[in-house]
Amino acid sequence: MFKLFPRWSTGSKSAAASAPMSASAQSAPGMRTENLCLFYGKTPAFRAVTLHFAAGQVNAIIGPSGCGKTSLLNCLNRLIELDVGTHLAGQVYLGEDRIQDIPLWQLRRRVGMLFQRPSPFPLSIYRNLAFPLREHGLRDRQQQRRQIQQALEDVGLWAEVKDRLQSPAQALSGGQQQRLCLARALVLKPQVLLMDEPCSALDPIASEVIEDLIRRLRGQYTIVIVTHNLAQASRVADRVAVFWQHQGVGQLIEVGPTQDIFEAPQHPLTQAYVSGQRG
Ligand SMILES: Nc1ncnc2c1ncn2[C@@H]1O[C@H](COP(=O)(O)OP(=O)(O)OP(=O)(O)O)[C@@H](O)[C@H]1O
């Protein structure tokens, strides 16, 4: 039997079972980093990132390849710790709490993640969503069913799969699989959703469906999305952070409301990047 969340199981299972499953939309906290630096071994990936991800908003991270966008995203739920030899300095806060002080199982429940490639478990559609619920201590079958239906409805998948919930998830189309993965994150009722290039493996129509969902989820979750697609960032984001690599090290060069970043950027490199002259 494969073990899915080997590092999640630190902390108390009984506490997981008794913790409230839901966080109300209005209470979704923001996240922020304070002077965050990441090293892979001795090599710095990014340096001195102080950045606020506004509560309930869609926060995009853009910038050329290699400037540390994915690495930063992976710091926000401590996934980065799975990379041997990484070293972090500085702090990350979820609301007022330092993420290091939040039990890992709770952090992973509060901060969900959607990856670049759809990654359903080799299980049925239904069990893809039941599995994380059980892992997080929800064993009541009726409540599981309710939450699973709700999550599938939230991603617009319920009508498409309700008659084949026991079919293998991997038989779904790529776009459906990505929506299933989003439902798998939502079923745990997180407060924050991290998305790493969530449309890059999808065709334009499936991408549009995901973008629509991101817009619909705005307000209910704090969303942080890494994207190479500048048009997508301008369509979905409320705020945009621009990263750049300086002497091989990623840096935050500008952050602001989406319109300002695309129409009146302050930093010359942002101007060059959004106009397509650089990057
Ligand atoms: N596991 C790792 N071990 C060592 N170095 C890494 C690792 N992951 C990323 N890096 C390095 O860290 C830097 C930032 O990489 P990262 O993938 O975070 O950038 P990115 O902006 O997301 O790039 P892309 O847009 O191409 O995905 C790069 O120099 C990369 O080679």
Image (cartoon, grey):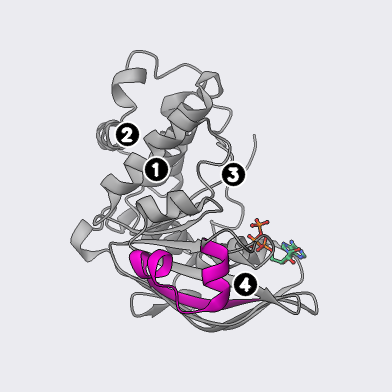
Q: Is residue 264 magenta?
A: yes
Identify the disc placed on residue 244.
4
Q: Is residue 111 magenta?
A: no
- The residue tagged 2 is 148
Q: Position of residue 19 (x, y in %)?
A: 31, 59
Q: Are marks 2 and 4 in contact (CB under 8 Å)?
A: no
- In the displayed structure, does residue 77 sit left or right of residue 20? right
- The residue tagged 3 is 4
- The residue tagged 1 is 133
Q: Are marks 2 and 1 in contact (CB under 8 Å)?
A: yes
> Which span of residues is magenta-colored?
250-274
- How far apart, in angstroms, are the residues tagged by discs 2 and 1? 9 Å
- How far apart, in angstroms, are the residues tagged by discs 1 and 3? 13 Å
Q: Position of residue 248 (x, y in %)?
A: 75, 75
Residue 187 visible in the snapshot: no
Q: Earlier in the sequence, mark 3 or mark 2?
A: 3
Local secondary structure at mark 1: helix
